[in-house]
Image: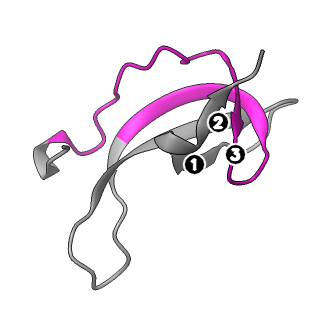
Amino acid sequence: MATPQDAHTEIPHPLLRKPVRDIASGTEGTLMAVLVENAAGAGQPEHWAEIAYIRPVGGGRELSTAIANIQAIR
């Protein structure tokens, strides 16, 4: 699993630059990056996770979600 020294490291992913859907929100777009980030709330112990960034169809602000929430759009 990720550790603090991996923070903000980009992770290779087979769906990078491809159309995806965030199953948590239903947002569709392009997977722009997957980064290792501390996902803990303020005052909580560190919790390192792989976070996906999706640029919505038509552009706009990128959405972040857990990498497990990403599925390819066919």
Proximity of marks 3 and 1: CB atoms separated by less than 8 Å: no
Nearer-the-camera pick, 46 or 26: 26
Give, as a three-letter code, the residue at label 1.
Ser
Disc 3 is placed on an element classified as loop
> Which quadrant of the structure image shows residue 12?
top left
Q: CA distance from mark 3 to mark 1?
A: 12 Å
Residue 52 at x, y percent in the picture: 51, 39
Along the polypeptide, which appears first: circle 1 or circle 2?
A: 2
Q: Quadrant of the C terminus?
A: top right
Say left or right for 6 vs 27: left
The residue that mark 1 highlights is 64
Which label is found at residue 35? none
Say left or right for 53 vs 37: right
Proximity of marks 1 and 2: CB atoms separated by less than 8 Å: yes
The residue that mark 2 highlights is 54
The residue that mark 3 highlights is 23
Give, as a three-letter code, the residue at label 2.
Ile
Stretch of the chain drawn in magenta: 6-35
Disc 1 is placed on an element classified as strand
Nearer-the-camera pick, 59 or 49: 49
Badge 1 crowding class, 10 Å Cα cut-off, few under 14, some 14 to 19, many 20 or more, is some
Residue 4 at x, y percent in the picture: 14, 51
Disc 2 is placed on an element classified as strand
